[in-house]
Amino acid sequence: MELSEKSIFRLTIFIPLVSILILAGILTYAIIDYQQDFLEKQFNKEKTQYIESNKALIKDEVNRVFDLIKFKKDSIYIRLKDRIENEMKLFYSIVNTLYEQHHKTKTKEEIVNIIKSTLREIRLNNNETYLNIFDTKGTAIMLPIQDHYEDMSIINFRDIKNKLYIKEAIEISKTTKDGYYSYYDVRPNIDQNKEFYKLNYVKTFEPLGLILSVGDYLDTIDKIIQREVAKRASEIRFGEDGYVYIVSNDGTLLSHRDKSLIGSNAFKIKDLNGKYYFKDGYIKAKENKSVFMEYVSATNKNYDSIYNAKKLSFAKYAKNYDWVISAGVYIDKIDAQIAKKKTESIQELQKFTAYIILLSIVLSVIVIVISSLLASNIKKSFILYKKLVNRKEKQLEDINNNLENRIVDEIEKSRKKDTQLLQQARFASLGEMIGNIAHQWRQPLSAISTISSANIVNLELGLLSKEDNIENNEKILTHVEFLSQTIDDFRNYLTASKDEKKVVFDIKDTIINIKKIIEVVYKDNNIDLKINFVKVNMNCYGISSQLSQVILNILNNAKDVLIQNNIQTKVVFIDTKIIDNKNVITIYDNGGGVPDEILEKIFDPYFTTKHQSQGTGIGLYMSKDIIQTKYNGILEVKNLKWNDSINSYYGACFILEIPIYN
């Protein structure tokens, strides 16, 4: 569909205007969406931070109650020890007084009986503290609560925890004379089959060899601690409305901000969702040692509606007392604050949207004015452009008329150039071949000349026997056969490619023929030529002489580099492999490598580092062209370190990859 000039001018005005409106709409939507998402994340972040800070607060308050329990326990424990020691001083003083009164007039047994009759009924601390006496061998002297064991050995007595507490007391009396030990014991005026945890203080009365033991029951301490902690917890306040509450194992509220609830069964209290949150908190805290919970409190009287009393609490289990100590704060205020901020944010976004719409209208008017001016200028330019196009079209028509002839001429020039390059490359190879022929023929011709001269001299002197003549002629024939074979080898290489047809041949045979051609020259220049053949055939499809030209060119270049660089130990190594369905021929030398600055240019036409009389710069160019175009392969060069399993070398590495013919 072609547009008229008028349509183009209208679009010049319409497209920018629509673009501005669309862009404004997209930007507005994107910004508002981003702002809403950003604010929502901010609100969530604020709420999370608020809840986390309150979690830390209520957790600290609960831990303070646990610290209070420990402090109370430690302080009361110290007071208990002081009291027990004072009680021991009292009993010890009475025993000592009785001993001083009677030790000169009465026997030991009589004094002990006086002590027993004097102290047996003495009770301290609400009738729960009394004196036990036994001797150093573990015989019971006086047990006011269990007098049926008196005069019996109690050294192997064990409490309900299987503790040998009498043995422990005797050991203390032997080592330190006095000290504390604890065990489970019966209690006055209570079922004698039930034992209670007790702290005892033991002291030795040496004149009579008696061990005095007095103590107090620790559950009394726990009751005092529980009473004091519960009272103190009811008074704890923190934050705006935080407080601490304690629930016992049967659900009794031991401590709460609302004193009217203390003593009631908290396990029966539930919120409007039917959740028994006191009971759930106790169970989860006991199972997990501590737990955070959120619920709607049904005990907050400061709210008009219980639905608003959203609460966060932390509950921790006190194993010694089977309590759950909790602290809670109301977190509904953050929801109200966030709702208020959301309303304010929506109002701000509405203002921003109105501003964007107004700005879009102003920009649209400006765009209409600018577009109108631009359309006028475009119209003028369009007219001039049409004239220019008409002129260029005429020129293009003339060019097209002559283009076909020019293409034919250029193709012919390119073909001639390629033919010339190939011919130059073959002439260069021919020069190399003539040198190789000279090296190959020099020794056998010299041998033939020597044998013939010797025959003539011996014949003139009459010294030539028939046998010697036959032997010498056989030697001459051997050398002639070698010369003939050399001619055949070089003729096979020099056969023009255009006279050959593509056939399947083994690359290893080609390399062997090349070795015959070049080995004399390599030997004369002290170059060690090593070849490693893969064990399988290296079949490929093409013209063998073309591949020979490539490999021979690389080997000649390697020879020139080794001689030019005056390498002492000259080595050239040909390695063959089959990799990924390709014949890979790698030719290494130890000539020091191709200089980095010319490495990428080495396959360029007419590029050479040799003197003009020695090289044309087309050998490697034609070699790469042959591998790529004739064999659909790859020829590349690298500088690298290599080794022949004995020595390590550094030099150029030419890699030929030619597809396998299957």
Image: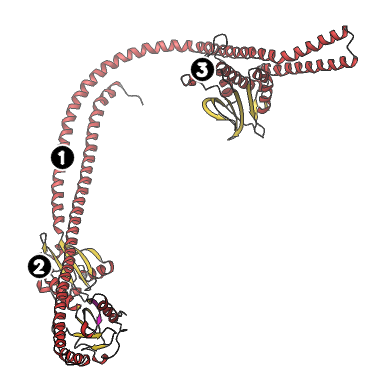
Instruction: Give the quarter of the image for residue 74.
Output: bottom left
How many other residues sit within 10 Å of disc 1, few (<14), some (14-19) or many (≥20)? some
Q: Which mark is residue 235?
A: 2
Residue 135 position (above or below residue 376):
below
Which secondary structure is most common in the magenta stretch?
strand
How many numbered marks have been drawn onto this rendered protein structure? 3
Residue 204 position (above or below residue 354):
below
Task: Answer yes or no: is residue 479 visible.
Answer: yes
| Residue wearing tag 3 | 604
Task: Answer yes or no: is residue 192 visible.
Answer: no
Instruction: Give the quarter of the image for residue 161.
Output: bottom left
Mark 1 is on which residue type? Phe
**Secondary structure category for the residue under label 3:** loop
Q: Which mark is residue 352?
A: 1
**Foreground residue, 233 or 121?**
121
Q: Which residues are magenta?
A: 179-185
Mark 3 is on which residue type? Asp
Q: Which mark is residue 497?
A: none
